[in-house]
Amino acid sequence: MTLTHAFVDVRRHLEVWCGYPSLAEAMQTFDDLRVYVAGGVVRNVLMGVPAAPKDFDFFLQGTSVASAIDYLGCTGRLDATPYGSPRWYPTDREVRYADLIPVADFAPGLWPCEDIVDVLDQFDFTANAVAFDLRTGEAFDPQNGARDAARRVMKMVRFDYPHGPYVPTATLDRNVVLWFRIVHYASTLDLTFDPLTRDWLRAHRNYEAQLDDFARLFFRPDLRALETVHG
């Protein structure tokens, strides 16, 4: 699937979501607001997964980001993600939410982000690291994530995150969070590990002892893919 065709399918998912009209109004109201969609909905389209997305990941950039988030909050409900960024429910009855992540606030432990490419270059795995500009349809794929999605390969973007809490107030290390996310998505999406990713997971398999801490803060991960790591 080409990125152009993928954007058409991503837009189709968005346009049937009840939050899309409010998002479109915010983009019309705030001319300088750039909205990029990334993460699961893009990844699943690239992999040919037909199911509707459970949620959306939007990265916001521009001088009006804070005003746009407040605007959306007036049309629904704002909570917080485990990372502290706004999570927007467009109505009280809608279970599908959108994480609204300011580009300037995305801080996984390396350099400050100035644009969407900086963001994608600090993502967890390559198939997740594809984004589209909702205004123009321009695609951003600095890590060849579309190729890896088509090949159904789980490949980490990088291995050099420093040790430390995933947010300043947390006790769980960011690399532990990354470890569980990589195993979980390889399991649920039936992906084959790239060799360097498998080696990193195997070298840090002691992180599995923190399963309950991860599940309490995020979700109960699917660990079936560990069979190929330990084997």
Image (cartoon, helix red, strand yellow):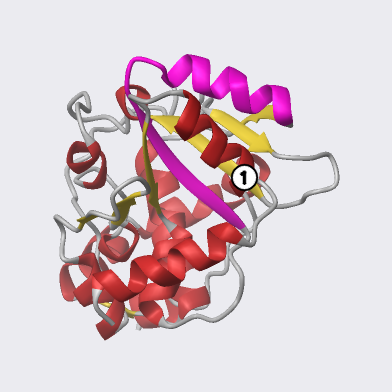
**Residue drawn at (65%, 56%) of the image:** 17
* Residue in front for this viewpoint, 88 or 13: 13
Q: Where is residue 75 drawn, in percent x and y? A: 72, 29
Residue position for label 1: 21
Q: Is residue 168 visible?
A: no
Answer above or below: position of 132 versus 70.
below
* Residue in front for this viewpoint, 162 or 81: 81
Q: Is residue 149 visible?
A: yes
Q: Where is residue 185 drawn, in percent x and y? A: 46, 67
**Residue drawn at (71%, 22%) of the image:** 74
- Of the 4 image quadrants, the one containing the C terminus is bottom left
Answer above or below: position of 65 versus 22.
above
On the picture, is 103 further left or further right than 112?
A: right
Under mark 1, the amino acid is: Pro
* Residue in front for this viewpoint, 124 or 92: 92
Q: Secondary structure at mark 1?
A: helix
Q: Which residues are magenta?
A: 55-75
